[in-house]
Amino acid sequence: MVAELKMAPETDSQDSGNIVGFGAYLRAVRQQSGYSLQDICQTTKVHLTYLDALENEDISNLPEPIYVKGFIKSYCEILKLDPAPVIQEYRTHIEANADRDVINVEVFKAKSFGERIVRFLMATKRLLTGREGYPMS
């Protein structure tokens, strides 16, 4: 099927063309299996937007990781793949991009619009300066 494809973190060298991330791997297997993204959507009942984000490794457009792991399991089941390596690669990907989520978490903890702005600015400052403080308790 797709034996020549191997998943690798996106930070690794991708010179060979055979090394792909988890999203590209799922897409390649799906296409070689003759499924459209719409077919996967109808079978798994996972929204097309999420499946597209999954294949593009667009973490910002995906829900919480617990849901994404379920999406990956359902997706792999249809493609007759072992979901464990794909889920592990997904985990590696989100850990590598964890700093991007700091702003989102801090901003959404706030209750008022003004507090959200303050938290957003403080989280941005922490990311830019590398400091670990929390502005509000």
Image: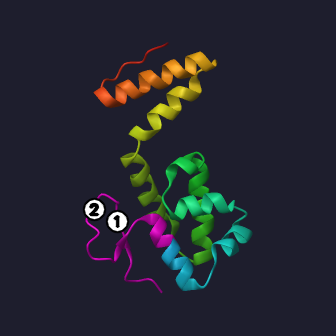
Residue placed under numbered mark 1 in the picture: 8
Relative to 54, say whether 82 is above or below: below
Q: Going 63% across and 80% down the picture, which residue do you hit?
A: 35
Tell me the amino acid under the disc marked 1. Answer: Ala
In the rendered structure, does residue 125 fall within the stretch colored magenta?
no
In the image, taking residue 60 as reference, residue 126 lies left or right, namely left
**Residue 25 position in % (x across, y down):** 46, 72
Label 2 to label 1, Cα distance in Å? Answer: 7 Å
Closer to us: 35 or 128: 128
Which residue is more in the foreground, 122 or 30?
Answer: 122
98 lies above or below 59: above
The answer to which quarter of the image holds residue 13 is bottom left
Pointer 2: what residue? 12
Q: How many marks?
A: 2
Q: How is the image coloured?
A: rainbow
Q: Which residues are magenta?
A: 1-26
